Image (cartoon, coloured by chain):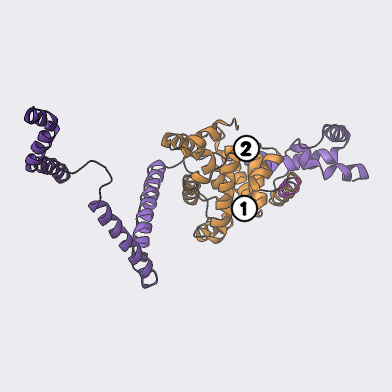
Amino acid sequence: MNRECKKHRKNLVAYMDRELPRKRLIQIDEHLQGCALCQKELEELRMPVAALLEWESIVPSAGYDRVFWEKVEGLKAGQKNRKEKSFSKQFRLCFKPKFALVTSAALAALIFLITFFELKPLNNEPSQSEILFVQDFDLLYNLEIIENREALENFEVINFLDILEQEVNG
Amino acid sequence: MNEDPHVQLMLRFQSGEQSAFKQLFEAYKIPLLNFIYRYCQDYRVAEELSQEVFLRVYKTVSSYRPDAKFSTWIYRIATNICLNEIRTGKYKYEINNACFDSGSEIKEFQAVDSRTYTGVDEGIVQKERHKEVRSAIKKLPDKQRMALLFSVYDQLSYKEIGHRLGCSEGAVKSIIHRAKITIRDIFLKKGNKQDK
């Protein structure tokens, strides 16, 4: 093996896979044409690769798809269970002594808010009792006027006092 | 935007379209099964591991980012599963027992192409050669084996193999060089001389 062979042999695999720059590929091509030893080397490298290519492909077994989709269903169910478990775990965590104070405070605040909004509705519509109260108030006011009727009559009398006086004097 | 149709399918699956996942499963189940089978040389383990790859895709859909070709991504998952599960996981026992050197012949399951069996003698010779080449493959270190499988069966460039294996183009060149030299030596030791 001369120096030229040594130089090209380290690139024979890459040459086989066409993974060299074009210039280098041409150089090896030219060398191979005149070198039987390197040609033999190349053939020996190609032989197991050719044997590998004869390795037949396989196809999945009959139950392959079914088994796989069952696994997917199992995975989905597992994810769902994990979510539920996570919620219940968090819920149970709230009642641990470590978080008892925070939980009690939160519950107290919730109860207060519910009670507050229950007693004081947010809308400004007057209730039935308020409407009745206002009507009664008007009535009461009118009643006062009626009760002071005599004073009103006196007022009328006073208004016509001039005419009365003229009549009396005249 | 990534033009790879399989990336588009994956994005559709990410947005909740289950049928897109079904399409991806149909497209990749045979190539992945064959890749893993050639790597581990055990049909049952190959079936389980290829399903595991799809389950991993299903589980990680929310974090999927279309940075590369879908095939690169899914084969990267497959190589990781092979390397981790087979070497250290529950499949270690089966793989050791599936070795050709133990004398047990690996059963051929539903061969797709039977055209290569042309005659009885030729068939026997060919079977013997297959056995030898598989035995040689088995002796390769993991990365060399994977790189060689990608190179021979998927006809990938060194760059693409590098993406799948997570290493540089230069590293792949060196890995494949060593792999091919090794199987050539094993093959020649077993008496497979050149026909010429």
Q: Is residue B174 magenta?
A: yes
Circle 2 — which element?
loop
Task: Compare residues A107 and B7 and report the one nearer the observer.
Answer: A107
Image height of B150 relative to A117, above or below: above
Q: Is residue B158 magenta?
A: no
| Earlier residue among tags 1 and 2 | 1
Q: Colour of chain B?
A: orange
Label 1, label 2: how far apart the Cα atoms are:
19 Å
Rendered location of residue A154, percent (x, y)? 9, 38
Provide the residue designation for mark 1: B138
- Position of residue B185 in the picture relative to residue A2 (left or right): left
Task: Compare residues A32 and B142 and report the one nearer the observer.
Answer: B142
Q: Given the image, on which type of amino acid does mark 2 rest?
A: Asp
Q: Given the image, on which type of amino acid does mark 1 rest?
A: Lys
Q: Chain of mark 2?
A: B
Image height of B51 relative to A91, above or below: above
Q: Among all residues in the image, which is located at the extreme right? A: A3
Q: Is residue B103 visible?
A: no
Main SS of the magenta segment? helix
Provide the residue designation for mark 2: B154
Could you confirm whether marks 1 and 2 are on the same chain?
yes
- Position of residue A157 in the picture relative to residue B42 (left or right): left
| Quadrant in which the N terminus of chain B appears | top right
Residue A157 placement: quadrant: top left
Magenta stretch, residue numbers:
B172-180
